[in-house]
DNA sequence: CCAAAGATCGTCT
DNA sequence: GACGATCTTTGGA
């Protein structure tokens, strides 16, 4: 994959500063499309370009873990500084990674749902135990991307401009269009369940979900 | 391609 | 004690 890598490893020392996260959550979600998430772990470096996200706009958002403004041990990172990692375990098995966002004092976040792998393909395959899967399937879905990237609760609350887990600036290509849909698996969120707060790169092979939700 | 079902455990009631 | 911001496997169209 090295010869197909769209960005050079030497660019991995660039990253968004804290000021980048000072924007409304839906705009931040939009801006995160095309940026590259990098994890430097003891096992090696993995990186992927963000192609699918969901905005969670608490405390009003009935789909958010911060709905109602209730602080808990799990969601406390959402109440903290923007640009840090909010990571949680879902269904007892899979970690999910979010970027903390929101106006001052409001617990909001952007869930990263899919990456286009750009570095560390073999390490991703090893972590997933998927030696022959299509490359675009390696980080397709919020749980899978965390497994492939080696992201766990050990990184809970980490700032995203450090040396371990960070974001490298990146843009969408001129021919890449943004699509939107309702968010996945939050039918319980009532009037918030249908809002178009899931954003993705249209027709990108690494985006998760059924085909009608990728066009 | 799509739908159904099972796995599995921290969190909150 | 119930339920997930999920994924894999299985089986059918």
Image (spheres, coloured by chain):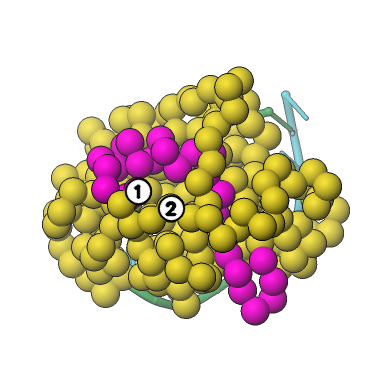
Chain colours: A yellow, B green, C cyan
| Residue at the disc numbered 2 | A16
- Specify whether disc 2 shares its chain with disc 1: yes
Q: Verify CB contact (< 8 Å) between mark 2 and mark 1.
A: yes
In the picture, which quadrant includes the C terminus of chain A? top right
Magenta part of the chain: A20-45
Hey, which quadrant is residue A71 in on the image? Answer: bottom left
Location of residue A155 with respect to A103 vertically, above or below: below
Location of residue A153 with respect to A70 vertically, above or below: below
Residue located at (47% from left, 77% from top): A154
Measured Cα–Cα span from mark 2 to mark 1 = 6 Å
Q: How far across and how far down the image is residue A11, in percent?
A: 62, 54
Q: Which disc is residue A7 wearing?
A: none
Secondary structure, mark 1, is helix
Query: Looking at the image, which is closer to me, A65 or B4?
Result: A65
Q: Is residue A170 visible?
A: yes
Q: Which disc is residue A20 wearing?
A: 1
In this rendering, position of residue A45 left or right of residue A104: right
Q: How far across and how far down the image is residue A41, in percent?
A: 61, 74
Residue located at (48% from left, 55% from top): A15
Residue located at (51% from left, 70% from top): A163
């Amino acid at each position: 994959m090295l010869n197909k890598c769209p960005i050079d490893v030497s660019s991995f020392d660039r990253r968004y500063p804290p000021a980048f996260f000072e924007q409304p959550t839906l705009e931040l979600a939009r801006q995160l499309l095309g940026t590259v998430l990098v994890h430097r772990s003891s096992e090696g470096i993995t990186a992927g370009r963000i192609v699918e996200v969901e905005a969670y706009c608490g405390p009003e958002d009935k789909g958010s873990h911060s709905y109602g403004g209730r602080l808990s041990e799990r969601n406390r990172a959402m109440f903290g500084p923007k640009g840090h990692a909010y990571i949680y375990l879902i269904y007892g098995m899979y970690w999910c990674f979010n970027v903390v966002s929101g106006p001052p004092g409001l617990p909001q976040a952007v869930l990263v749902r899919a990456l286009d792998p750009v570095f560390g393909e073999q390490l991703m395959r090893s972590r997933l135990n998927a030696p022959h899967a299509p490359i675009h399937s390696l980080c397709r879905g919020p749980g899978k991307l965390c497994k492939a990237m080696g992201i766990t609760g050990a990184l809970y609350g980490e700032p995203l401009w450090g040396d371990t887990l960070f974001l490298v600036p990146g843009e969408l290509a001129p021919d890449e269009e943004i699509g939107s849909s309702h968010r996945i698996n939050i039918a319980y969120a009532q009037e918030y369940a249908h809002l178009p707060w899931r954003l993705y790169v249209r027709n990108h092979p690494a985006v998760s979900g059924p085909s009608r939700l990728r066009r």
